[in-house]
Image (cartoon, rainbow, N blue to C red):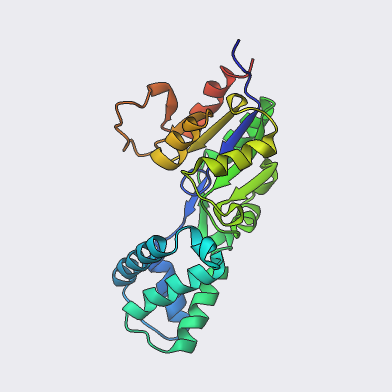
Amino acid sequence: MRAPLRWVLWDVKDTLLKVRASVGEQYCKEAKRVGLNLNPVEVEAAFLKAYQHHSSRSPNYGISQGLDGRSWWIRVVRDTFSQCRVQDPALLNAMAHNLYYSFCDAENWEVFPDSKKTLESCSSLGLELGVVSNFDNRLKEILRVCGLLSHFSFLITSEKAGIAKPSPAIFEQALQKCGVPAANVAHIGDHYLNDYLASRSVGLHGFLLDRDNKHKHPDLPAEHRLSSLEELPSQLQQHIN
């Protein structure tokens, strides 16, 4: 007998919402506030280099090394601007501090048009909703200002959990909060490894959101791949009863 679906777990960034402008543009906007005129393309390239360096050296915001999300991001931002020939330590610290907190503003995020309606549809099916995200602890405030927080019974960020997807451990933490076996839970996200494969490896009903039709994996059944969140409720409904 098939276990009925009771919960849906959600990835957030690039699933429910996305950064509105490029990182290069947002960082240049902050630099302009303190009188610096930088090139967004150069800043974007510097950011990617800094982000990859710190992600490799200190994974998951450096939690296991005694860092937290805020200190980790401040290092990334400082390194980004340092590569763009900004050397004043006070200026670097000020911009890093301001950017860390400005990313909690709703104006920096764009909620996908299908997000709220799909969340409401899932709730109307009697499903409980939770978040499992490789994000820092600003996520609760970001979801609040974007009008999405009230849809969720709980949030698990990789910073708070101390572990990141694709580790099964972060999904195990979520299942403890759900209070039901994995067979009663679905997960939806846009990353093939972190969301789809990782969730299915612990027995969840994993769905991959592929808005841009970029995933061509031969082992991905058509019914597990969604081109829009609007396709999700009908898929979930098949597993409810």
> Can you say whether 161 is above or below 15 in the image?
below
Which quadrant of the structure image shows residue 42? bottom left
Q: Nearer the viewer, residue 233 or 197?
A: 197
Residue at image point 39% right, 75% down: 79
Q: Is residue 191 visible?
A: no
Q: Left or right: where does residue 68 sit relative to residue 76? A: right
Residue at image point 66% right, 48% down: 149
Q: Is residue 179 visible?
A: yes
> Can you say whether 68 is above or below 221 in the image?
below
Horizontal and vertical percent for residue 49?
32, 66
Which quadrant of the structure image shows residue 212? top left
> Can you say whether 84 is above or below 111 in the image?
below
Horizontal and vertical percent for residue 158?
55, 52
Residue at image point 51% right, 52% down: 110
Which quadrant of the structure image shows residue 21? bottom left
Q: Nearer the viewer, residue 52 or 57?
A: 57
How many discs appear?
0
Horizontal and vertical percent for residue 6?
66, 26
Residue at image point 50% right, 68% down: 72
Q: Nearer the viewer, residue 170 or 19?
A: 170
Q: Left or right: where does residue 29 sit relative to residue 46? A: right
The C terminus appears in which quarter of the rendering? top right
Residue most extreme to the front? 65
Horizontal and vertical percent for residue 66?
55, 68
The N terminus appears in which quarter of the rendering? top right
